Amino acid sequence: MTEPTRQKEKAKVQRPARPLHPGVQPNRRIEDHALIGNLRSAALVARDGTIDWLCLPDFDSDACFTSLLGTPENGEWVLAPKARIQKIERRYRKDTLILETDFICDTGTVRLIDFMAVRQEHPRLVRTVVGLKGKVTMHSAVTPRFAFGRSVPRVESADGSLRAFAGPDALFLRRSDQSAAPPLVSDIQVSEGQRISWVLSWNYSWLDEVPPRLDADEAERETERFWIGWVSKIVPPPRYRDTVVRSLITLKACTFDRTGGIVAAPTTSLPETPGGARNWDYRFTWLRDAVLAHNAFARAGVRDEAASFWKWVMRAIAGDPSQMQIMYGIRGERRLTEAELGWLDGYGGAKPVRIGNAAYDQFQLDVLGEVAAVIYAGAKTTGQVGPVAQRALLNVAEQTMQVWRKPDKGIWEMRGPDRHFVASKVAAWGAIDRAIKAAEETQLAAPVDKLLAVREEIFNEVCNQGFDPELNSFVQYYGGKQMDASLLNIPLFGFLPATDPRVVGTVAMIERELIQDGLVLRFKPDATGSVDGLLGDEGTFLACSFWLVNTYQMMGRFEDARRLFEALLALSNDVGLLAEEYMPKLHEQIGNFPQVFSHCALVNAAYTLAETRA
């Protein structure tokens, strides 16, 4: 048994599955879910066969199944055996996003196959039950609720489909074994060798057309061909192949194919603090994620996706660089107004449930550095730092020179006071540095002398005001004593080498102050909320732990890097997915799910581990 396998088995022992009761909403953990999607939207499928989250037609649309954040009355689709379940086994079909769940029951065994058909005119969710052994009675209960669980639709028959509609949305339900409209609630006995499919389609309610009947079996074959064909382009690292491929499939599944934008997660308001108020909408595209996502795709050899996302970034930031936001909608929208949905109880009672994200208009200095890094890296990926990239880099650098002295909200979008965060200043240094590199490589007409002077000024200020000699460490912000995992970006940006004594001292302090059960906290929230403006503890941040893997490897601490990486892999759920955070005391994942930041960091760490040791 390999080391990752041993870790995985250990993790399973620590986190026993909770009892599941068909037809009754169980206390589902975040990690009890799997993702299916069609490169436009995505659904979460729980271990018990319930789909409790689905937004249609797009990632950022209103949800029609919202019980994940409320109750069954807020919409879901239960599809599970009525007989007593002895065991549940599930997996993704190899190198695809087709989910297979086997229910081993007292009376027999059935397989539930879930997927969303890719690149269809109308979004299609397909659920197929296959009898494997004996006879099993399956219970299907579809509870459509539009407007995030608030709107109860009108239901009627329409051309062989059951049509549910309210406001702008309409859902159409068909079943493969009958030509008439199926009921929303039904029981059906499935025998060995029998195969029955349900197809749920979306359309605008004001269009009279019923989406054409879909051949579920052919759609399954086409979807399988699509994913296997896409995965065939990946150049995996020599170790951890399956884990890296699963993470890359997840990143692809979170990509809005029409524009190249990548949602940070397909969910909203899954809490960072159990029962708390750190509940944010992640169905948007963060510029900060751009560096990690672009690098992950580029290092894996899927350059079309890397280039597509790079082009999305270039379109989103076009115009006056002083108006650059930290995040945009998946099509590049700028206004992401935040609202609270008071009718939803929240996951595990965590309120408020939010849609939109007020952080979009925060000033976060570090974004300038991350945008410069992805422009520079993306231009390299496409083969040259051409005139468009040159102009964009210079615009970002000029804006950075104007604003780098200002305090900001920092990388973690603090809702407390503005501060001079060290990681933000390091990122500002990175923005100037990338413009200088582009100028040196392309004869870019840039004020190089001024850029060099500002880069040196930022470097000196950070080393003088952001480094605490008593602690022998950089600190979270000027004058503070707290640690912050974002300081791990110092060597990743190239600000200082990982072997510099100041970086070594910073890593030692992070190990002392921010390591919890072997994993890394972003920072330590305090009882007054003075750090980020909010109360309550949060879990260890998985992306930060992967950053530490990178840093260990760059420092030459190869065994520490490998051990931490494999411990992190053991935290993924049974189908290889990671949320934003992990709560050691609960042995559970928390935060929005699955989290692009976590999976990008995993992929990049895997390739870093594969690089030749110096």
Image: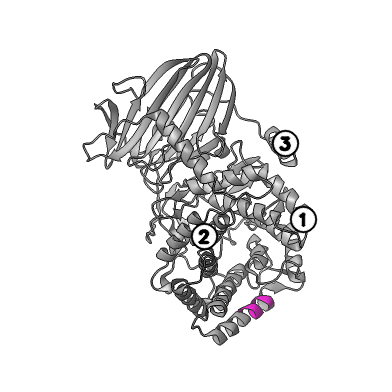
- Magenta span has 35? no
Q: Is mark 2 on a helix, strand or loop?
A: helix
**Real-space CA distance between mark 1 and mark 3, rounded to the nearest whole angstrom:** 23 Å
Q: On the picture, is 260 further left or further right than 590?
A: left
Predominant SS of the magenta segment: helix
Whichever of callouts 2 and 1 sits on the residue coming sooner in the sequence is: 2
Label drawn at residue 558: 1
Residue matched to label 3: 10
Determine the residue located farthest toward the bottom in the rendered image. Answer: 449
Front position in the image: 46 or 491 = 491
Element marked by disc 3: helix
Cα distance between the residues tagged 2 and 1: 27 Å
Front one among 581 and 576: 576
Residue placed at 50% from the left, 57% from the top? 306
Residue type highlighted by circle 1: Phe
Vertical placement of residue 121 versus 187, above or below: below
Mark number displayed over residue 290 = 2
Q: Residue 125: x and y, percent?
A: 40, 35
**Measured from the top left, where is residue 497 in percent x and y?**
71, 69
Q: Do the residues labelled 3 and 2 touch (CB within 8 Å)?
A: no
Q: Tag 3: residue type?
A: Lys
Amino acid type, mark 2: Ala
Q: For the magenta stretch, what is the residue range?
A: 458-463
The answer to whether 285 is drawn above or below residue 106 in the figure is below
Identify the mark nearer the N-term, 1 or 3. 3
Give how far apart the Cα atoms at labels 3 and 2 are. Answer: 34 Å
Which residue sits at x=37%, y=36%?
Answer: 124
The image shows residue 84 at horizontal and vertical percentages of 55, 17
Mark 1 vs mark 3: in front? 1
Residue 436 figure quarter: bottom right
Closer to the chain start, of discs 3 and 2, is 3
